[in-house]
Amino acid sequence: MAKPIDKIKWQELEDGAIVTEIGSAREYHTGSWRSARPVVNKDGCIKCGACWLFCPDMAISQSASGHFEADLTYCKGCGICVRECPAGCISMVDEEEA
Ligand code: SF4
Ligand code: SF4
């Protein structure tokens, strides 16, 4: 019987490869993986840009007002922006409640 996926060590993973066209990242809508989304409380935002800097998917952009918000097409809900926000003004909201 195969081991459950959460019991497999990375050293035991089989070799594999994902082949895609160069420059095709925009076509992969990683937001479909998300179970929770980051929501910014604009009143608490100091417009520092740390969320933009740390987002591993470059899924945060600055609006005309200077506030930052996630592009939900690509935000996969990792929560890194919540952890890095120095003002504590981003919270993760369950997709079913959003
Ligand atoms: S939850 Fe993750 S992917 Fe989404 S905006 Fe924040 S850092 Fe980026
Ligand atoms: S990290 Fe927080 S305070 Fe800084 S721009 Fe992003 S939401 Fe605003």
Image (spheres, rainbow, N blue to C red):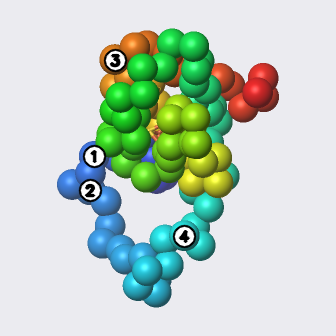
Look at the numbered disc 1 and say if its residue's Cβ is closer than 8 Å to ligand 1.
Answer: no
Q: Which SS class for mark 3?
A: loop
Give the residue type at disc 2: Glu
Q: Where is residue 34 shown, x and y percent of the image? A: 62, 42
Viewer-nearest of labels 4 and 3? 3
Q: Is residue 20 above or below residue 90?
A: below
**Of marks 4 and 1, which one's residue comes earlier in the chain?**
1
Between marks 4 and 3, how big is the CA–CA gap?
29 Å
Quick check: 76 left or right of 54?
A: right
Look at the numbered disc 3 and say if its residue's Cβ is closer than 8 Å to ligand 2.
Answer: yes
Q: Residues within 10 Å of mark 2 (few under 14, many from 20)?
A: few
Q: Which residue is mark 2?
A: 12
Between marks 1 and 3, how big is the CA–CA gap?
34 Å
Look at the numbered disc 2 and say if its residue's Cβ is closer than 8 Å to ligand 1.
Answer: no
Q: Which numbered circle lies on residue 17?
A: none
Q: Residues within 10 Å of mark 1 (few under 14, many from 20)?
A: few
**Of marks 3 and 2, which one's residue comes earlier in the chain?**
2
Q: Which SS class for mark 2?
A: helix
Residues at badges 1 and 3 in contact (C-beta under 8 Å)? Answer: no
**Image quadrant assignment for residue 74:** bottom right
Q: Is residue 2 above or below residue 14?
A: above
Q: Which residue is mark 1?
A: 9
**Of marks 1 and 3, which one's residue comes earlier in the chain?**
1
Residues at badges 1 and 2 in contact (C-beta under 8 Å)? Answer: yes
Q: Which residue is mark 3?
A: 86
